[in-house]
Amino acid sequence: MNKSKYFLAGLVFVVVTFVSGSVILELMDTGLESFYSLLQFTFKRFTAALVMGCFAGVINIYLKVLPFRNIRYRR
């Protein structure tokens, strides 16, 4: 149950960052005329989503591990 909850939280985080990153990159790169710039734009968006997904995974691992460590140290 806990693993699925953390996985869903990470998935939502990745989707939100993917959408917001795509919007920000679209605002930055307003002139998308050629196919090459469009391809580069999608590659940048995918890379940004991948990096944010890695960050989300690390954050989820820390959120999962740290509370149990604190409980063990208190006892």
Image (cartoon, rainbow, N blue to C red):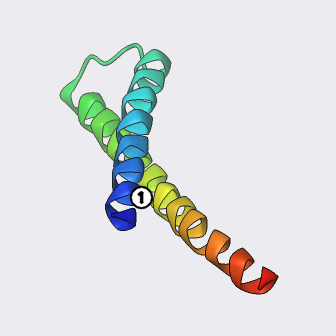
- In the image, residue 48 lies at what x, y percent? 43, 45
Residue at the image position 44 percent from the left and 28 percent from the top:
20
Q: Mark 1, residues whose alpha carbon is within 10 Å: few (<14), some, or many (≥20)?
A: some
Name the image quarter holding residue 45: top left
Q: Residue at x 41, y 14 (%)?
A: 30
Quarter of the image for residue 40 reads top left
Looking at the image, residue 69 sits to the left or right of residue 14; the answer is: right
| Residue at mark 1 | 6
The answer to whether residue 13 shows anywhere in this view is yes
| Residue 34: image location, x then y, percent | 23, 23
Residue 60, percent from left and from top: 51, 61
Task: Please state the horizontal and vertical placement of residue 64, each as a whole percent of the image.
Answer: 54, 68
Furthest residue to the front? 75
Residue 28 lies, with reference to residue 60, above or below; the image says: above
At x 80% / y 80%, what residue is drawn?
74
Q: Which of the pair 60/71 is nearer the observer?
A: 71
- Observer-nearest residue: 75 or 10? 75
In percent of the image, x 36 and y 66: which residue is there? Answer: 3
Q: Is residue 50 visible?
A: no
Quadrant of the rendering where the N terminus is positioned:
bottom left
The answer to whether 24 appears left or right of 43 in the picture is right
Q: Nearer the viewer, residue 20 or 1?
A: 1
Q: Is residue 72 above or below residue 15?
A: below
Quadrant in the picture for the C terminus? bottom right
Question: Could you say whether the residue bearing mark 1 is in a helix, strand or loop?
Answer: helix
Give the tally of numbered discs.
1
Check the image and report above or below for 2 versus 14. below
Q: Is residue 42 left or right of residue 35?
A: right
> Of the residues shown, which amino acid type is indicated by label 1?
Tyr
